[in-house]
Amino acid sequence: MKSTLLDWFWTPFASSHLRKTIRRVQPDVVWAIPHDWSILPLAGCLLNSPQVFHVSLHDYPDVHDSSRRFGKKRCARMADFADQLYKSGTTRDAISQPMADDLVGRTGRSADAIVRFGLESDRIQDLHETTQTHDASKTTIRLAHAGTIHKHAVFELLIESLDKLRGRLSRQLQLHLYGAHSYRTQRWFNSAWMVEHGNLPDTELNAQLQQCDWGLLSMSLDNSDPRYDRFSFPTKFIAYLAAGLPIITLAHKEAAAARMAAAYNVGLLSHSTDASKLSEELCNTLDNANSRHTYRSEIIRCAHEQFDARRMRQNLFQCFEKSANQATS
């Protein structure tokens, strides 16, 4: 009902407001980010319009439980409009290379850039200058999970595997959860070794992540949500890199994050669906007291080559300039 009301009443109002704003501001370029409810007014105002615009596509609109939230037909319409916006944009970017390749196949248009959350130059420089070595007095292994848990069954498998080896490790395990959602009522939550910190500002989150030993990232293992797993890129991966954390990635081999973890040795990459086998992999990995030092060079290389915010910003501004020049030519 909420989606129907938004579609019938909010969308026409938002479309009218956007048209008036464009007429009043007369921008050289409109920067369109088609995401959920922004898609309908963006499509209504920009498609078949002389206005030049740049499109940044971060997620496909038909992932997770979008069909349930918006309605199957409405969700399909949103997905079609997102593709049309990407195809019609004067310039465009995607969040991952797999997404860019997929969009070429569907729209015939290649991405002008790959743009996603990145690391500023000072943060990358910090990665060069800081090295965490083994602290003999440290009695805990601090695991971090930042952001939303999308695949609860996979995350529960990860927790089950970790729980199996808690008594086998030389140090105690702690799991620190950061994000806007509380998971205290989930059946896997165990306050004996898990702590929730809530949603923190970026600077504070980065400072707390730096005190951890590993970052956790879990995605679908059966490719059941390919439009998200294969093409979107989880920001938590980048947040862990920013803090210099090695990453435990549990995902299907075709997932964008798994492909990144396979290209750069930034931690443990597993595709295991068996808790006992995964537990053995984790045991061998977590007992490494110098994990940050072990993966440091690859974390830095990955940050430089894939997540340099300055370079991505330059590429984005070049797209804006290209669009603006086309408008005046």
Image: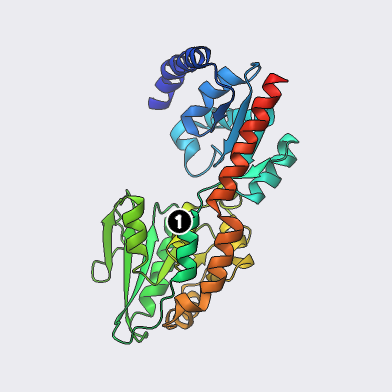
- Image quadrant for the N terminus? top left
Q: Residue at x 41, y 54 (%)?
A: 149
- Residue on which disc 1 sits: 236
How many neighbours does mark 1 have within 10 angstroms: few (below 14), some (14-19), or many (20 or more)? some
Secondary structure under tag 1 reads helix
- Image quadrant for the C terminus? top right
Residue 259, given in percent of the width and then of the height, sits at 62, 61
Q: Residue at x 50, y 61 (%)?
A: 124
Task: Report the label total.
Answer: 1
Residue 252, given in percent of the width and then of the height, sits at 58, 61
In the image, is residue 104 above or below residue 235? above
Residue 185 visible in the current orientation? no
Q: Is residue 228 left or right of residue 170?
A: right
Residue 5, given in percent of the width and then of the height, sits at 40, 20
Residue 247, given in percent of the width and then of the height, sits at 48, 67
Q: Is residue 327 left or right of residue 289?
A: right
Q: Residue at x 61, y 31 (%)?
A: 54
| Residue 264 sits in quarter | bottom right
Q: Residue at x 72, y 35 (%)?
A: 107
In the image, is residue 191 above or below residue 34? below
In the image, is residue 36 above or below residue 231? above
| Residue 244 sits in quarter | bottom left
In the image, is residue 61 above or below residue 96? above
Amino acid on which disc 1 is placed: Lys
Nearer to us in this view, 232 or 273: 232
